[in-house]
Image: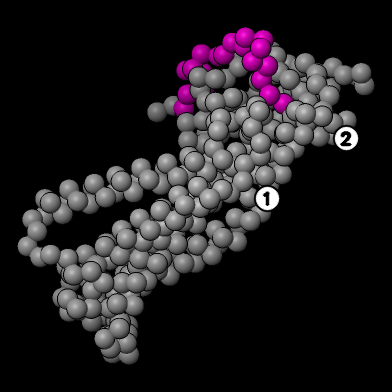
Amino acid sequence: MKDWWDQRPVFSTTDKGGRITGLAPGESPGQVTPRLVTSAAVCFGAWGAASSLGTSWLCNASSAPAETCAVDLPSGVPVIWRVVATVVVAYLLLTLTLNFGEQARQRLGQRRAASLVRATAVLAGIAAGAGFSVVTGFAPDRAGTLQRTLDGRIGTEAYALSAALTLIAAVWWVTVVGRLPSALVHAQQRQATIERLRRDGRRYAGTVRLGGIVFWLGNSPELNVTIAYDSPAGTHELAARMRTSPDRVPADGSRVLVFDDLRGVVHVELDLDAAPTFEPEARCTPAE
């Protein structure tokens, strides 16, 4: 599947920020696929295991009884090896999560929807792993352990931290899941509209006039731009947002293609056949 971001800049006359949606030429609107669900399950499992191991490490490091820890980690391991293991696990988790997020972004064509899909898997994993540690710790004596934890007794620190992490992750997960369906629908509808306009819309040649940078999302600037084009109905000027990278900011006056359905819905994209030139990268690079 082609990556819509390779066709940047991406324009939108309706959306801003992470809601700006793209679709690579020749591609169909992306949907949640079995492969994406599998990647989400792997991400969930990895974060669940890491969360359980992390809270178990806290439990083993405290004066809590060993049998109440979710995982009985080996004792006597030098601190340096614990640090190395933590760094390696953190690197693997970060790589796995970023790859999953990129897969979702490429498939769904929108950064907001992709970030919510990624957050759903990560938060669910953290809540499940930390929650497993809480259940394990409280299992031998639920009422007594709960009371000692509420009283702040020595040896219950790991239970309290695990419970707090579980609660925070669970509440955050509910918030994300509540926003996810509308984000998926919006991304799919926007991609379907782009596909429809490319197929059935009237095509006009236009130009882009650059405005100021609104903000950077990561290292990618978003600019206010004006799209000018002529149609049988006259001359038109549209205010739009443009998301791109510092090395692909089209020069002022660059040619664009405007697809119009004559009902007020338009799609704009850079005319790559016109051999566009780009502004110097330093012009739109965020200051250190």
Residue 115 visible in rendering: no
Q: Where residue 8 appears, x then y in whole percent?
A: 58, 25
Three-letter residue code for mark 2: Arg
Amino acid type at mark 1: Val
Count residues near mark 2 (Cα–Cα under 10 Å), then give few for <14, some for 14-19, many for 20+: few
Residues packed near mark 1 inside 10 Å, few (<14), some (14 to 19) or many (20 plus): few
Question: How far across and down, in percent of the image, does residue 26 sit?
Answer: 66, 28
Tell me the magenta residue range: 268-286
Label 1 – label 2 distance at C-alpha:
22 Å
Is the residue 156 above or below the residue 44 in the image? Answer: below
Q: Where is residue 68? Give x, y as percent.
A: 23, 78
Residue 213 position (above or below residue 279): below
Q: Provide the residue designation for mark 2.
A: 263
* Label 1 sits on residue: 185
Of pointers 1 and 2, the one earlier in the residue sequence: 1
Quadrant in which the C terminus appears: top left
Q: Element at badge 1?
A: helix
